[in-house]
Amino acid sequence: MIKVLHIGMSYELGGIEQFLINYSKNIDKDLIKIDFINVFEVAKKQSYYTELSKLGKIYNIADYRNHPFKSYKQLKEVINNGNYDIV
């Protein structure tokens, strides 16, 4: 199985989020597992957040614009612990 970690969700439904939803719904989940990084607190209230959480794990980390060191530390921890093939 290939493990993928996607970084770059935004706080509202846009092209990237819609692409991720469509792609994640249509991949062979026995071959590819996709998880997501979220840095926006407000994104948790969006409908796409709930949909993506059904398709893979969402890691909520600190917003890099407000807490760059904390965000970096949390991101590094997710990557190191997740054994991802693609980030």
Image: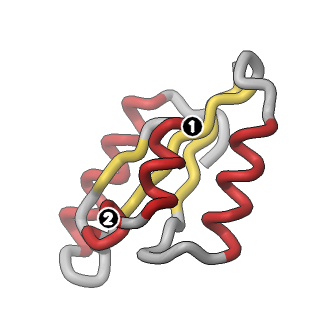
Residue displayed at 44% across by 37% down: 57
Residue displayed at 79% across by 34% down: 27
Q: Position of residue 10 (x, y in %)?
A: 48, 74
- Secondary structure under the numbered disc 1 in the rendered image: helix
Q: Give the image's coloring scheme.
A: secondary structure
In the image, residue 76 above or below residue 12: above
Q: Position of residue 84 (x, y in %)?
A: 56, 34
Q: Position of residue 86 (x, y in %)?
A: 66, 42
Query: In front here: 61 or 49?
Result: 49
Amino acid type at circle 2 is Lys
Mark 2 or mark 1: whose residue is earlier in sequence? 2
**Mark whose residue sits in front, 2 or 1:** 2
**Residue assigned mark 1:** 55
Q: Is residue 50 left or right of residue 67?
A: right
Residue displayed at 55% across by 73% down: 13
Please identify the quadrant where the N terminus is shown.
Answer: top right
Q: Is residue 6 left or right of residue 1?
A: left
Amino acid type at circle 1 is Leu
The label shown at residue 45 is 2
In the image, residue 4 above or below residue 33: below
Categorize mark 1 by other alpha carbons within 10 Å: few (<14), some (14-19), many (20+).
Answer: some
State how far apart marks 2 and 1 are (Cα).
Answer: 17 Å
